[in-house]
């Protein structure tokens, strides 16, 4: 668990009381979870004004999403920046997202890469994935497949599905790493288990033909069936698979798909 420094209250010269700050923040999180944004704001604002980075980040999220307040990306940038400058990794990642999207600030890939890197170096899996993506594209940073793959691996090893899917893509195509379909299938499978529809689609293709894994038409159809809930082309490959399967195999695959449940999602540090 990350520990956060006690920050002196802005303009007051008073230290935040850790116990009351923790209670206020926990009350705010509970209020957000039940949709009581007025109560959340009541708890967050005093903490944020006194320099609590967690509260500043949460305020940034509420302003960015327009929950309990009118959506205001400029205010979101302001609060995320305050928390980011204190080293709060999630705020650094979210601030980078705003620079990437040009929301509340002028679009700037260089600034985005800077803040993604700061969060990534603290172990934030979302930021590691996003920084890897910029390195892959060469946006805001020099293009570097090797470094992109290294950041995706860090995120993947934390169980972050987007990082797993990107790393699998590298192994499938041989970009940034030696091509290895078995490793591609391994990482697609991990992301697929977290309900990543692109990974489910890609895994279905690999498994059906036995690329990187023994061919298994029932499992492949199952993944195509699951992916069809969110992937626009999954129904197409499912139909193609069905042409080469028996009715019994299809029935078994559909049964498995109905019974399947995703693994709990992994994300950034809290």
Image: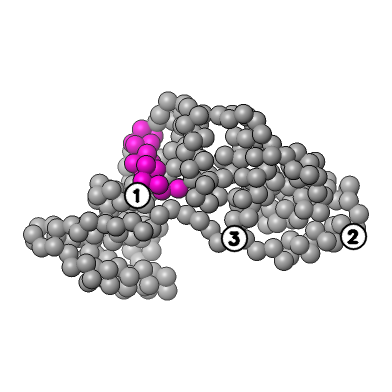
11 left or right of 168 in image: left
- Real-space CA distance between mark 1 and mark 2, rounded to the nearest whole angstrom: 50 Å
- Real-space CA distance between mark 3 and mark 2, rounded to the nearest whole angstrom: 27 Å
Along the viewing direction, whichever of 24 and 109 lies nearer the viewer = 24
Where disc 3 sits, the SS reads loop
The residue to which callout 3 is attached is 263
Along the viewing direction, whichever of 93 and 61 lies nearer the viewer = 93
Instruction: Give yes or no for contact between labels 3 and 1 (Cβ–Cβ under 8 Å).
Output: no
The residue to which callout 1 is attached is 89
* Rendered residue at 87%/57% (across/down): 249
**Is residue 33 at least partly visible in the picture?**
yes
Spot occupied by residue 154 in the image (x, y as percentages of width and height): 48, 43
State the extent of the magenta-drawn residues as a range: 107-125
Where disc 1 sits, the SS reads helix
Q: Is residue 100 above or below residue 124?
A: above
Instruction: Determine if the magenta segment contains residue 121.
Output: yes
The residue to which callout 2 is attached is 248
* Rendered residue at 47%/31% (across/down): 147
Q: Earlier in the sequence, mark 3 or mark 2?
A: 2
**Is residue 37 at least partly visible in the picture?**
no
* Rendered residue at 47%/27% (across/down): 144
Residue 110's quadrant in the figure?
top left
- Real-space CA distance between mark 3 and mark 1, rounded to the nearest whole angstrom: 25 Å
Q: Earlier in the sequence, mark 1 or mark 2?
A: 1
Which mark's residue is nearer the viewer, 3 or 2?
3
Residue 118's quadrant in the figure?
top left
Instruction: Determine if the magenta segment contains residue 177.
Output: no
Spot occupied by residue 140 in the image (x, y as percentages of width and height): 40, 31
């Amino acid at each position: 668990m990350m520990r956060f420094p006690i920050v002196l209250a802005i303009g007051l010269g008073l230290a935040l009381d850790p116990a009351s700050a923790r209670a206020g923040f926990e009350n705010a999180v509970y209020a957000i979870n039940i949709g009581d944004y007025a109560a959340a704001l009541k708890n967050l604002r005093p903490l944020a004004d006194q320099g609590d980075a967690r509260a500043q980040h949460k305020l940034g999220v509420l302003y960015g999403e327009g929950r309990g307040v009118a959506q205001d990306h400029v205010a979101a940038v302001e609060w995320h920046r305050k928390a980011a400058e204190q080293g709060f990794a999630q705020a650094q990642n979210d601030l980078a997202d705003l620079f990437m999207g040009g929301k509340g600030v002028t679009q700037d890939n260089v600034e985005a890469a800077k803040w993604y890197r700061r969060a990534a170096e603290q172990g934030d899996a979302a930021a590691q994935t996003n920084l890897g993506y910029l390195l892959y594209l060469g946006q805001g940073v020099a293009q570097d497949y090797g470094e992109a793959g290294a950041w995706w691996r860090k995120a993947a090893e934390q169980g972050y599905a987007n990082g797993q899917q990107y790393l699998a893509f590298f192994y499938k195509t041989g970009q940034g790493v030696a091509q290895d379909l078995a490793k591609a299938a391994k990482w697609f499978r991990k992301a697929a288990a977290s309900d990543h529809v692109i990974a489910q689609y890609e895994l279905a293709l690999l498994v059906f033909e036995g690329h990187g894994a023994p061919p298994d038409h029932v499992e492949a159809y199952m993944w195509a069936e699951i992916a069809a809930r969110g992937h626009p082309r999954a129904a197409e490959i499912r139909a193609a698979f069905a042409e080469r399967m028996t009715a019994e195999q299809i029935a078994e695959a559909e049964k498995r798909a109905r019974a399947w449940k995703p693994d709990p999602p992994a994300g950034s540090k809290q």
